[in-house]
Image (cartoon, grey):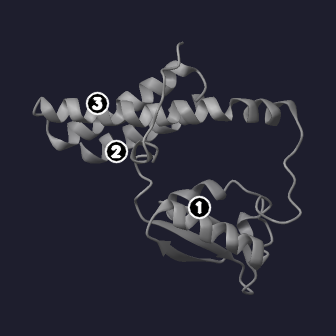
């Protein structure tokens, strides 16, 4: 696959949902001890994923702090992890060290390429939406065309198997709820 010459402007570097509100959530045990701090566009969905964690049975309640966008939420989340000393957060704590494994080294090597490809996928999504809109497609079809174009672009790279699978799952769930 040939990687296109990418000279992005600041506005094209933002993921499609980056401007949407996101929550910083805290998970607490029954005694009021802080167990975990995270951030998500959809804390309910994210907590469903946390249910697989061995510490999940300790969770008694969740609090949420909503931020105007994802960047703000990440910043609040990382500051909270560093200061509030939750029991189960590892990344973001002063003692956390990235493991030195072949997989981590490979991921670091591929990170710049993966970022460029993600940025290009966002441009592909926008172009597909513009094209669908120009052809007079209904708004739902315009949105679907953009998402599908981005998914197919990432799938073709071969570097985003898990992300492609999750995006296809979400798209199918959206279609099922709409239809």
In space, the residues marked 3 and 2 are separated at their CA atoms by: 19 Å
Quadrant of the rendering where the N terminus is positioned:
top right
Image position of 94 (left or right of 76)? right
The answer to whether residue 59 is seen in the rendering is no
Q: Earlier in the sequence, mark 2 or mark 1?
A: 1
Q: Residue at x 41, y 37 (%)?
A: 122
Which numbered disc, 3 or 2, marks the residue closer to the eye? 3
Residue 9's x, y, as percent? 42, 42
Tag of residue 174: 2
Answer with mark 3 or mark 1, whichever residue precedes in sequence. 1
Residue 90 pos. (x, y %): 80, 60
Q: Earlier in the sequence, mark 3 or mark 2?
A: 3
| Element on which disc 1 rests | helix
Q: Which residue corresponds to mark 3?
A: 128
Cβ–Cβ below 8 Å for labels 3 and 2? no
Compared to residue 125, the image places residue 94 above or below, namely below
* Residue named by callout 1: 47
What distance separates the C-alpha of mark 3 from that of mark 1?
A: 32 Å
Left or right: where 19 falls relative to 23: left
Residue 179: which quarter of the image? Answer: top left
Residue positioned 88% across, 35% down in the render: 101
Q: Residues within 10 Å of mark 3 (few under 14, many from 20)?
A: many
The residues bearing labels 2 and 1 have C-alpha atoms spaced at a distance of 19 Å
Mark seen at residue 134: none
């Amino acid at each position: 696959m040939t990687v296109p010459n990418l000279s992005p402007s600041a506005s094209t570097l933002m993921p499609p949902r980056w401007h949407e509100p996101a929550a910083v959530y805290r998970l607490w045990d029954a005694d009021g001890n802080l167990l975990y701090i995270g951030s998500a566009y959809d804390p309910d969905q994210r907590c469903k994923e946390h249910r697989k964690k061995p510490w999940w049975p300790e969770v008694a309640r969740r609090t949420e702090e909503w931020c105007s966008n994802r960047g703000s939420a990440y910043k609040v989340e990382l500051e909270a992890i560093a200061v509030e000393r939750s029991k189960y957060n590892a990344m973001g704590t002063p003692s956390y060290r990235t493991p030195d494994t072949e997989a981590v080294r490979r991921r670091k090597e591929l990170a710049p390429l993966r970022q460029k490809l993600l940025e290009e996928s966002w441009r592909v999504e926008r172009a597909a939406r513009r094209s669908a809109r120009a052809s007079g497609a209904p708004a739902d079809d315009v949105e679907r065309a953009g998402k599908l174009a981005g998914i197919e672009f990432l799938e073709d790279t071969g570097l985003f198997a898990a992300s492609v699978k999750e995006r296809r799952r979400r798209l199918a769930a959206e279609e099922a709820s709409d239809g």
